[in-house]
Image: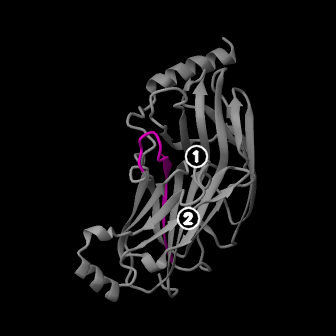
Amino acid sequence: MSSHSRRLILAVLCMGMIISTAGATYAGDRPLVDVYHDEGHLQYLYTIGDSIYRGGIGSDETYTVSFSLDLPPGADIRFQRLYLYWAWSNFNQKPFYPLYNLSDSRDPFSDLERSARYVDSKGVVGTYDFYSGTDSYLFPPLHPGENNFTITLLQSGPPESSVAIFGMAVLVIYEDAGEPRQLIWVKEGCDILFSSFGISPDMASSEMIFEGTLPSDEIAGAELFLVAPSGGYSRDRDFEINSLRVNRVDEERTPLLMRTIFSLLFPNYQGKEWFDIFVLDSPTQMGFEKREIKPYLRRENNRVVVRDQGDYLQLTNAILAVQIAGDEI
């Protein structure tokens, strides 16, 4: 039996066994999931290496990304993941869950192990309702000092299958005595947001709760980092194409007297909303947002909402790093 025939049989089996995406739409119906939360002298590093966007990668075609990470001499790795961002996966113009083999140049004869797959689609009856997603992979351990390696992807689906690749990314969280004391949360997934086809901006909103109680110590800073393939560009609107809300309070539901009292005692009680977030990286067509949100933090269960208003985006990663004043853990 030829290799193409084996892959075709495997693809058919996978299509029958895969988890259903029933309910997937352009609304915020695929919230990101928690994969890491800890406290210590922590720091995170996120890089897309030399990723570039490629549309229509066919069967047996390859895609490579090189990474170069320089970690401090005292770095103790606490968490690491490789992310693969993909879209428009189809087989003979029908929705299809893509098949890949990924390898690391440091161990080229072993395929990487996928730890999770997150999938979404527009959910509208008709043509071109293809799958998009984020794959999370385990890969050989990083170490203090220079880490230089290349990840190679082989599109191992059947003939006539095709998938677009935005790029790859490496996320590493490490502890080092030279870093500030921080609490770090990491969320990952794939939630396609687009206020179109009957989906309103309120519906096209993805909510995240960073669960937990902050220590009573003084907060030195709070950085929110977001990743969204396709985010930051719209053909339909020039302004207010999306927004970011942090602990935003619906004023209409708060009595006027209470609003007045709260505004006097707690100037930031309403939270904050920013429009036109995500800086678009042209080579990858991915949007990135880094925002200081310290003034709008609450002591527990901080709420963040990303809302689409005509942008079209795949929300895939969220990292919250809250720095505590002082050096004691």
- For marks 1 and 2, the one nearer the N-term is 1
Compared to residue 74, the image places residue 242 above or below, namely above
Residue at left offset 40%, top offset 80%: 268
* Residue 198 highlighted magenta (yes or no): yes
Which range is magenta? 182-200
Q: How is the image coloured?
A: one colour
Q: Amino acid at mark 1?
A: Tyr
Residue at left offset 70%, top offset 33%: 57
Q: Which mark is residue 225?
A: 2
* Residue 258 highlighted magenta (yes or no): no
- Can residue 79 be spotted in the picture? no
Compared to residue 324, the image places residue 142 above or below, namely above
User: Furthest residue to the top?
Assistant: 1
In the drawing, does residue 12 fall left or right of residue 161? left
Judging from the image, what secondary structure is the residue with disc 1 in? strand
Q: Nearer the viewer, mark 1 or mark 2?
A: 2
Residue at left offset 66%, top offset 45%: 166
- Identify the main secondary structure in magenta: strand
Judging from the image, what secondary structure is the residue with disc 2 in? strand
Compared to residue 211, the image places residue 176 above or below, namely below
Q: Amino acid at mark 2?
A: Phe
Residue 28: % across, % down: 42, 49
Q: Quadrant of the N terminus?
A: top right
Compared to residue 5, the image places residue 144 above or below, namely below
**Mark 1 neighbour density, 10 Å: few (under 14) some (14–19) many (20 or more):** some
Residue 300: % across, % down: 35, 72
Mark 1 sits on what residue? 137
Residue 22: % across, % down: 39, 33
Instruction: Report how many numbered discs are placed on residues in the image.
Output: 2
Residue at left offset 60%, top offset 18%: 8
In space, the residues marked 1 and 2 are separated at their CA atoms by 20 Å
In the drawing, does residue 128 fall left or right of residue 267? right
